[in-house]
Image (tube, grey):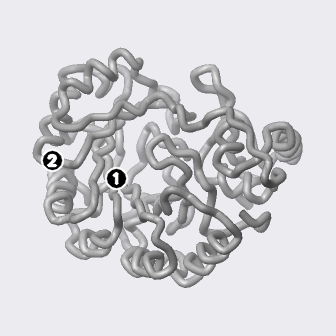
């Protein structure tokens, strides 16, 4: 990938589910319908349900073309980023534009909150893979965990995901994010599993905390408990709580570029291994670049599960 700093494109990101995923960011930082307690990007700064053309679709496609022509070859092009992507009113136009550029499959990672809208379901219909989220089994925990916009109800959200899944010709993977002492217990997991049966996705992906979270009280469920809770869910179930995607494999086909590192960390905290595997960098050079960025106060470190994560600072966003 080029050493320029892209405005809307980031990665490729090392993904537990999608391999090397080239991300497209459709909304300004933390513009979302939720304010989840476990979010790796921190607190939501603009909670809204108003859909708008937040960024120009043509500019996003131009960056994508440039990255692909420069040799980027991800496993997926992922519509995700630093907020809820379905808030962008041009998401359907973007997916159609991607399909004209490349045969690389398109994935959309969404919290599913706006799938009750027929226009949103229609706009996502051309994607290859959609991964909506379901983090609670009732209204009370929905408000505790996701802290949704007041115009979004739990029942409406679940019904929207269900209706989309029934009409979508691609693959739907339902991500269920479990939290220790909250939803990572049998009684609550059973409630979520009942909703999953209604939704009937192609597979369920059980996840838990593996990166820094918005709230310190959002804690990981143990792998053993995750495996036990997986037995409660219908159909194909994957436990993806262990972040094996950030391997320690060495790359050397390009040197560490500060702009690319900043661009990645602005959307996702990563370990050193995650940065190297995602961007194709050599670890020794990357360590030097990370130290420089820390000294410049453009990035900072955070510790979770005995791992060091690098994440963007307020200065780095400027």
Residue, x 75% and y 54% (percent of image)?
316
Can you say whether 259 is above or below 142 in the image? below
Q: Secondary structure at mark 1?
A: strand
Earlier-in-chain disc, 2 versus 1: 1
| Quarter of the rendering occupied by the N terminus | bottom right
Instruction: Tell me where residue 57 appears, x and y as whole percent.
Output: 51, 80
Q: Do the numbered discs 2 and 1 sit on residues whose CB atoms are within 8 Å?
A: no
Residue on which disc 1 sits: 131
| In the foreground, 24 or 170 | 170
Residue on which disc 2 sits: 200
| Quarter of the rendering occupied by the C terminus | bottom right
Residue, x 21% and y 24% (percent of image)?
231
In this rendering, position of residue 292 left or right of residue 91: right
For disc 1, the neighbor class at 10 Å (few under 14, some 14 to 19, many from 20) is many
For disc 2, the neighbor class at 10 Å (few under 14, some 14 to 19, many from 20) is some
Q: Secondary structure at mark 2?
A: loop
Count every numbered label the image shows and give the total. Answer: 2
Residue, x 17% and y 56% (percent of image)?
156
Residue 103 shows up from this direction: yes
- Residue 28, image quadrant: bottom right
Can you say whether 208 is above or below 169 in the image? above
Residue, x 36% and y 15% (percent of image)?
224
């Amino acid at each position: 990938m080029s050493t320029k700093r892209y405005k809307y494109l980031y990665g490729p990101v090392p993904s537990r589910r999608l391999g090397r995923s080239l991300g497209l960011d459709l909304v300004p930082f933390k513009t979302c319908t939720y304010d989840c307690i476990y979010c790796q990007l921190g607190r939501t700064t603009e909670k809204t349900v108003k859909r708008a053309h937040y960024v120009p679709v043509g500019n996003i496609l131009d960056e994508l073309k440039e990255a692909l022509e420069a040799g980027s070859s991800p496993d997926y092009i992922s519509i995700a980023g630093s907020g809820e992507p379905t808030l962008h009113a041009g998401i359907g136009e973007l997916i159609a534009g991607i399909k004209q550029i490349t045969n690389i499959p398109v994935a959309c990672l969404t919290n599913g909150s706006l799938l009750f809208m027929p226009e949103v379901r229609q706009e996502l219909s051309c994607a290859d893979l959609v991964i909506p989220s379901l983090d609670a089994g009732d209204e009370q925990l929905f408000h505790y965990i996701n802290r949704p916009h007041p115009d979004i109800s739990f029942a409406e959200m679940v019904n929207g995901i269900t209706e989309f899944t029934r009409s979508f010709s691609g693959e739907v993977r339902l991500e269920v994010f479990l939290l220790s002492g909250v939803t990572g217990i049998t009684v609550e997991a059973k409630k979520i599993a009942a909703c999953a049966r209604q939704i009937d996705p192609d597979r369920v992906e059980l996840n838990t905390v593996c990166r820094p979270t918005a709230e310190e009280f959002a804690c990981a469920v143990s792998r053993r408990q995750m495996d036990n809770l997986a037995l409660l869910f219908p159909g194909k179930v994957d436990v993806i709580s262990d972040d094996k995607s950030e391997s320690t494999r060495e790359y050397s086909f390009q040197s560490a570029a500060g702009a690319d590192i900043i661009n990645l960390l602005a959307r996702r905290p990563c370990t050193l291994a995650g940065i190297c595997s995602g961007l194709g960098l050599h670890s020794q050079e990357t360590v030097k670049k990370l130290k420089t960025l820390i000294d410049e106060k453009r990035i900072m470190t955070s510790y979770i599960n005995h791992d060091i994560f690098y994440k963007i600072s307020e200065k780095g966003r400027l």
